[in-house]
Image: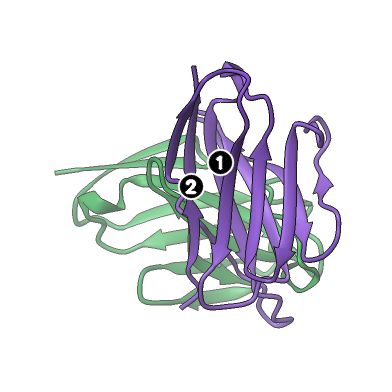
Chain colours: A purple, B green
Amino acid sequence: GAVVSQHPSRVICKSGTSVKIECRSLDFQATTMFWYRQFPKKSLMLMATSNEGSKATYEQGVEKDKFLINHASLTLSTLTVTSAHPEDSSFYICSAQTGTRSYNEQFFGPGTRLTVL
Amino acid sequence: LAKTTQPISMDSYEGQEVNITCSHNNIATNDYITWYQQFPSQGPRFIIQGYKTKVTNEVASLFIPADRKSSTLSLPRVSLSDTAVYYCLVGDTASGYALNFGKGTSLLVTP
C-alpha cells in the first residue's frame, strides 16, 4: 500500500513552453502533498507544501507564478512549470502524507525528469 | 527544523555491517528521527523511524542515545544494491512537517 505515482516520468520541452506534472496517491487519501526539486548530485529541496482545497505554501525563493500548484482532490496534486527555461531542468519529486496522527510518514513518487532545451 | 550533519560519503565491502551516524544537536522534544534511502533518479524510500533507544525492522536498525543528539543507522550485511544516498531527517511527524533534506550520505558498496 501507500503508493504514489507521478506522470510523466520524463519530459523534454522547448524553452518557453509550460509543463504539467501530476502526482497521485493511488491507495490512500493524502491530506498534504509536497513538491521537491533535485539537481544532479544534490539533495532534495522543498519547493512547496500543498493541502487539498487550499493555496500552496511556497518556500522562500520559489516563484509561485512560475511553479503553479493545484491540489484539487485528496489524491491528486499537479505542478505546472510555466514558461520553462533551461535552468528549470531538474528532477521533480512529489510526496504525499497520509495524515494519520500517530505516524505521518511521507511516501514519495518516482520523480519526473524535466529537460528544457 | 533541527539541522542534521552526516558524513558525505562512505565505502563498504559486501557483507559488512554499515553504520551511518547523524548529528542533530538541537533536536526538539516532539521530533522524531527518520531515515530515507534514495537511488539515482528515484524518489526517496522510507527506511526507519524512531524517537529514542533502539528500533529495528526487516532492513535496518536505528540506535538513538538517551540525549537524542545523534542517531546511528545500521545496515546489516550490505549488498551491492544498498549503494544509495541515505538521508537523516528530524522533525515533528505529528504536526505534518515538511521534510528538510540535508546533504545525505552517499554509500558505495563494492564486491
Q: Position of residue B68 (x, y in %)?
A: 69, 63
Q: Which residue is mark 1?
A: A92
Report helix, strand or loop for mark 1: strand
Residue at 50% over, 54% down? A6
Q: Nearer the viewer, residue A109 or A104?
A: A109
Q: Is residue B12 visible?
A: yes
Residue B58's place in the image compared with B74, above or below, is below
Q: Which residue is mark 2?
A: A111
Residue B59's place in the image compared with A109, above or below, is below
Q: Chain of mark 2?
A: A
Q: Position of residue B28 (x, y in %)?
A: 81, 62
Q: Nearer the viewer, residue A2 or B91?
A: A2
Q: Position of residue A13 (x, y in %)?
A: 50, 26
Query: Mark 1 and 2 residues: CB-CB less than 8 Å, in contact?
Result: yes
Say left or right for B48 vs A100.
left
Q: Chain of mark 1?
A: A
Tag 2: residue type?
Gly
